[in-house]
Image (tube, grey):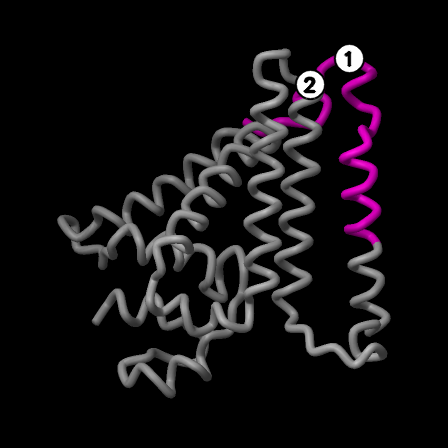
Amino acid sequence: MTTSVDDVLGDDPSAKTGSAITVVAGAVLVLLALSWVLDLHIRLGLTVYDEQPLALAAGLSMLIGADILSRSAGSVLRWPLLLLGVVLCAIMVVIAVRYPTLTVTAMMRPSWLVISSSVLLAGLLFLVWRTIGLTLALIVVAFAAAALFGEAIGIPSMGFDFLSIYLLMDPNSLLSLRCTSRCRSSCPTCCSESCCAIPAAASS
């Protein structure tokens, strides 16, 4: 069963009007997209990877989603939901800023990245559940559980630290960090060009 925007917001007209957070974040999101389409970074002589504006856009989108939910929630949940959106957006901003070094540090699985990835993915699952529906969130949880505990039934498994970073960094996951060129120079067991070093290390 899916959840519509009207189901999330309810009948309260004030919940459907944009708050300052949603308006500002939405404006920044539009300006970010326009600047990228117009190659503004090239005109200014800046080196920007594709994944950096992607991370910023994902963070802003999660902030907007959490803000919309917070305005339709009760007084008890309003501030926790808003705080969740701010934290998720802040994590994506850090990832965007530190992206050039993450292509190397992701292979070492630093604790701050494992924790940040776990919080980000858990928060994103919650937002998916509340805005889209429980079904999609449960499907993601089921596949994650299979990756963690599937060895007993013949499914290759990996540790939680590998999985949390993999779900964030792999080209087929939330953020496409292109680690391949850096991985090949430092990890002789790195897999094919379409994969990140995280799953390669997990299977070695």
Nearer to us in this view, 150 or 77: 77
Q: Which residue is mark 1?
A: 12
- In the rendered image, the vertical position of residue 99 relative to residue 74, given as above or below: below
Residue under the point 55% across and 65% down:
98
Left or right of 94? Residue 61 is right
For the residues labelled 1 and 2, the Cα–Cα distance comes to: 8 Å
Residue 2 magenta-highlighted: yes
Label 1 residue SS: loop
Which label sits on residue 57?
none
Residue under the point 46% across and 75% down:
179
Percent position (x, y) of residue 167?
43, 55
Magenta span of residues: 1-30
Residue under the point 55% across and 59% down:
95
Direction left: furthest residue: 152
Determine crowd level at label 1: few under 14, some 14-19, many 20+ residues with C-alpha closer than 10 A.
few
Residue type at mark 1 is Asp
Which label sits on residue 72?
2
Label 2 residue SS: helix
Residue under the point 47% across and 72% down:
103
- In the rendered image, the vertical position of residue 29 relative to residue 200, given as above or below: above
Left or right of 10? Residue 197 is left
Quarter of the figure with the N terminus: top right
Percent position (x, y) of residue 2?
58, 29
Quarter of the figure with the C terminus: bottom left
Residue 198 magenta-highlighted: no
Residue type at mark 2 is Ser
